[in-house]
Image: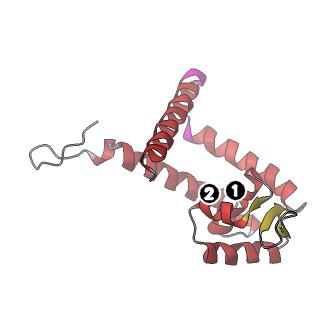
Amino acid sequence: MDTKLSDADPIDYDRSFGFLVHDTARLLRLAFDRSVRSVGLTRAQWFVLAHVIRKDGQTQSSLAEETDMDKAPLGKLVDRLEQGGWVKRRPDPNDRRINRIFKTAKVNPLTTEMQTATDQLYEKALCGLDEGERNRFIDQLILIKGNLNAELDRTAQ
């Protein structure tokens, strides 16, 4: 990978790991948003709801950390999701100062629709890769994610 910053040997941004990962994630988000536009949720609402679906019943604080959002803007998004009937806040049984966020039954049919849209999008995105290449690619992403988590743990002080 080219990482040099000199004028004599410039970075090839079209082959830059960071740019490719960022642009690919951005394009996946845009394509997914278009494929499920009819549901009527904003991208930010989708993002938060997906994290609630992934880990139902987590605290609002852990949801803020997981989504890398400040608590106030997240609270407003959760308010709108709750008003729309997508999620429900419930007090923690051990500490009533803490709210836990739960998906509602309204989400269940949406989950199936989201999974279908995701499967179709991934099929298009991975077109040209056979099953072995797809599995190796996923394994490599898991390895990279693990490496980055280990680095963050190592440098967290």
Q: Is residue 127 above or below residue 132?
A: below
Query: Does the stretch in magenta take in 46?
Result: no
Between 51 and 149, the one lying in front of the other is 149
Res. 128 visible in picture: no
**What type is the residue that disc 2 sits on?**
Glu
* Percent x, y of residue 108: 86, 55
Q: Residue at x 19, y 43 (%)?
A: 4
Q: Residue at x 48, y 48 (%)?
A: 24
Q: Is residue 144 above or below residue 60?
A: above
Q: What element does badge 1 sit on? A: helix
Between 62 and 11, the one lying in front of the other is 62
Callout 2–callout 1 Cβ contact below 8 Å: yes
Q: What element does badge 2 sit on? A: helix
Please report whichever mark, 2 or 1, sits nearer to the chain's N-terminal start: 1
Locate residue 109 relative to residue 132 in the image: left or right: right
Res. 126 visible in picture: yes
**Main SS of residues in magenta:** loop
Locate residue 152 relative to residue 15 in the image: left or right: right
Label of residue 51 in the image: 1
* Percent x, y of residue 77: 69, 74
Category of crowding for the residue at label 2, using alpha-carbon neighbours closer than 10 angstroms: few (below 14), some (14–19), many (at least 20): few
Q: Residue at x 62, y 57 (%)?
A: 66
- For marks 2 and 1, give the CA distance: 8 Å
Q: Is residue 43 above or below residue 75?
A: above
* Percent x, y of residue 122: 62, 41
Between 142 and 45, the one lying in front of the other is 142
Category of crowding for the residue at label 1, using alpha-carbon neighbours closer than 10 angstroms: few (below 14), some (14–19), many (at least 20): some
Residue annotated with mark 2: 66
Question: Quarter of the image containing the N terminus?
Answer: top left
Magenta residues (range)? 125-132
